[in-house]
Amino acid sequence: MRYLILSDIHSNLEAFEKCVNTARGHYDEVLCLGDLVGYGPDPNAVIEAVRELASLTIRGNHDKACAGLTDAEDFNPLARAGTLWTREQLTPANLAWLQKLPSGPCEVSGIELVHGSPRDEDEYLVESYDTAPAFEEATSAVVFFGHTHLQGGFVSTPGGSSQPIHCYGVENGCTLKLHIEQGLRYLVNPGSVGQPRDRDWRAAFAIFDSDQRLVEYYRVAYNLSATQEKMRKAGLPEPLITRLQFGR
Ligand code: ZN
């Protein structure tokens, strides 16, 4: 089975469509690691597209906040502005769907899906030294996570320490093929579809082939200026618009 794994779409329809179109024909099922909304200009269109496409979607912290399950008080002012704007846009049906999204971890044929980490859906796994509790809590050898908007992840070495997984690629397409080795454990971050923060503005996703035990990481350029134009028209804060082009 080949899974297209999408995370942190953040209401960016152009980035989402580019990822799905690039991956077309290379996957059997779509899994979504949360944060469909928040920041970007197309919350309803993104929710409707993911509802249609994904066989499993778990919630992220922005989904919770935009659905009114949490307040946005611990968000920075820009993220809060995006949340409040999104709440006003959501149709009743999409709001209701967002409110019912399951929290991670969820298990799909031997892999584990979380938004932040296996022990806490809101935890950020940024550095290797942060990852020991997450590896301890993980119930499968391969965990897919998002939340940090950083493509890559971590592999635990036989000695018990953890190493970062680095993806490089100037060309659009596959940035890394990662073979899942017997005896090692992995935390895999496909990167953010709609708001990357690893200084590469291009949309990120991953495809996991469970038979070949292979993760392919991808980066693809999308119509960024169209997204930014929609954000300006919507009156979203300018720093949210400019950060997209810097991948920050
Ligand atoms: Zn996010």
Image (tube, rainbow, N blue to C red):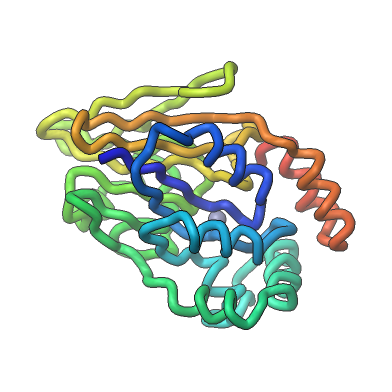
For residue 208, side relative to residue 191 (left or right): left
Q: Work out whether 182 lies above or below 109.
A: above
Q: Nearer the viewer, residue 218 or 182?
A: 218
Q: Which quadrant does ligand 1 occupy?
A: bottom right
Residue at image position (24%, 55%) is 108
Residue 15 point in image, percent of width and height: 63, 43
Tell me which corner region of the image, top left, top right, bottom left or bottom right, holds residue 162. top left
In the rendered image, the residue lying farthest to the left is 183
Residue at image position (63%, 68%) is 75
Tell me which corner region of the image, top left, top right, bottom left or bottom right, holds residue 128. top left
Residue 90 point in image, percent of width and height: 67, 74
Q: Nearer the viewer, residue 247 or 101?
A: 101
Q: Work out whether 247 lies above or below 44.
A: above
Residue 201 point in image, percent of width and height: 66, 35
For residue 124, side relative to residue 70 (left or right): left
In the rendered image, which quarter contains the N terminus?
top left
Residue at image position (42%, 33%) is 25
Q: Work out whether 19 lies above or below 240.
A: above
Residue 154 point in image, percent of width and height: 33, 37
Q: Nearer the viewer, residue 99 or 196?
A: 99
Residue at image position (53%, 60%) is 35
For residue 160, side relative to residue 186 (left or right): left
Tell me which corner region of the image, top left, top right, bottom left or bottom right, holds residue 10. bottom right
Q: Work out whether 93 lies above or below 193.
A: below
